[in-house]
Image: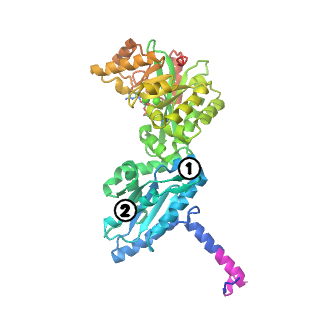
Amino acid sequence: STNLVEDEHVGGILLNARDVSERKAFEAELAHQAFHDPVTGLANRSMFAEQVRQTIARARRDGRSPAVIFLDLDDFKTINDSLGHAAGDEVLIEFARRLDESIRGADVAARFGGDEFAVLLEHVAEMQDAADAAQRILELLARPMRAGHRQVTLSGSIGISVFGAEDARDADELIRDADAAMYIAKRDGKNGYRVFEPAMHAGVLARLELRNDLQRALVSDEFELYYQPVVRLSDGSVSGVEALLRWRHPERGLVSPVEFIPIAEETGLIIPIGRWVLREGCRHARRLGADGTTLRMSVNLSLKQIQYSDIVADVRDALEDSGLAPDRLVLEITESVLMDDTELAVERLSELKALGVGLALDDFGTGYSSLSYLSRFPVDILKMDRSFLGDGAKPGSRSLATAVVGLGATLALEVVAEGIEEPEQAETLRALGCDLGQGFLFARPMTAEDSLAYVAEHPHRSAAHAAQS
Ligand code: C2E
Ligand code: CA
Ligand code: CA
């Protein structure tokens, strides 16, 4: 070794100079690994937090104003999922290089993992400085970079949290607030930045917490499926059930899917969660059909599952593992699935159809429902949105319902009216010739056990899927 390291006594053992230099190199390597992100070489979260702590402590003495910038790349998953992880890493590394080059000496750039980055600005004289820094980061992202054989450009959402005079926040709080502001920037349309204000806290913090908790919910077995009967309007018999996801949060109790599904979609967690719903729903359908009946099980799918996972394999696996006949499973999708990427949707839905499952168009009428879409997609069932029922007093809602039922008849699709609460609504729909209904009037979503009892107590009769065009 050319390193001239003096001999050292370690624990009474005399090490020679070579051992010592090797050990030091090894220790340095370990220290580097402990404080740096292995992919990009930037500081990692713990190193960054430590730097923020030190900078804040100095700022308290000398009155300077550090700022934390929190960056989350927009739609980075798309790159990873469509071009592969190697291409994804290539992009992260290139962006990290640009970021590192663009910051000033005393500033720190970090990667928190995934597609999250942070920058510590050691001092911002005025708010505009921080805003300019955020703007520069967005520009770095917008410059084309290589991802495998492709060129891509990125965008990101940025939150800024500035440490002011008399600021009582600690490092973790400063970072957390930048994260909260990022969340608002993302929600307000991505590719932009927002400066943290205390008023952002209430809603955003709750969401951040939910996001963290959601990551554990699947492994902690906190999800549950409720089931709501779908009833034949002509004779009141049960034709099937719809599986509705519930999250039994250890502190909050039952959390509504309206609250957590959007977060699950944003984070990509909807894919493993949706896979679980499919398996669990199919398993329960077997129990419901234990007496030989052929009740149908409807499962809701998210657009993300169709775009970013092998949904066909997941459905096939769920069917095979449960032993459920494919024609007893109905997959519910909303129109947005059809709107976003029509080619992909047509292909996926046709593959799903080929497995023998039924397809329902959910919340029909709330989107851009156009007839040309309907004719291109191999759907069997229209689920008419609750808003079509109106409050009964409005004459307009009745004519809309009439139109949807008529459309179903024309295209040979079954129609399920959702959200029936009043007997008059059921009566009106029956008179219009609507096949099926679902709503609190008949039954609220119930636990798996209750659904078994419900089915045992009510006459049931399933329908074959409507003829295909
Ligand atoms: P959705 O698919 O339209 O489900 C129907 C919603 O209407 C359910 O809300 C149900 O409880 C509610 N509902 C049923 N009958 C009535 C009624 O008579 N009156 C009123 N006011 N509401 C009624 P829920 O269970 O809160 O689910 C909300 C949404 O969350 C679902 O809307 C669906 O889009 C989504 N969701 C639920 N489970 C899953 C899932 O496993 N995966 C995915 N991707 N989305 C799910
Ligand atoms: Ca549904
Ligand atoms: Ca619906």
Q: Residue at x 51, y 63 (%)?
A: 96
Residue segment shown in magenta = 6-25
Question: Which quadrant does the N terminus fall into?
Answer: bottom right
* Magenta-span inclusion, residue 354: no
Q: Which residue is mark 1?
A: 80
Residue 41, percent across and down?
Answer: 56, 66
In this rendering, does residue 135 appear at all? yes
Task: Name the residue carrying label 2.
Answer: 161
What amino acid does circle 1 point to?
Answer: Asn
Most foreground residue, 434 or 348: 348
Describe residue 193's horizontal placement relative to residue 300 as left or right: left
Residue toward you, 384 or 428: 384
**Residue 177 visible to the viewer:** no
- State which mark lies toward you, 1 or 2: 1
Residue 353 falls in image quadrant: top right
* Quadrant field for ligand 3: top left
How many marks are shown on the rendered structure?
2
Q: Position of residue 177 (x, y in %)?
A: 39, 59
**Label 2: few (<14), some or many (≥20) within 10 Å?**
many
- Image x and y of residue 15, in percent: 72, 83
Q: Can you tell me whether the CB of the residue at mark 1 lies under 8 Å from the nearest atom of ligand 1?
A: no
Image vertical order of residue 397 relative to residue 21, above or below: above
Mark 2, ligand 1, within 8 Å: the answer is no
Q: Residue 35: give x, y in percent of width and height.
A: 55, 67
* Residue drawn where x is 40% and y is 18% of the image: 405
Which quadrant of the view contains residue 6? bottom right
| Badge 1 element | helix
Residue at mark 1 to residue at mark 2: CA–CA distance:
29 Å
Q: Secondary structure at mark 2?
A: strand
Between 154 and 429, the residue placed more toward the observer is: 154
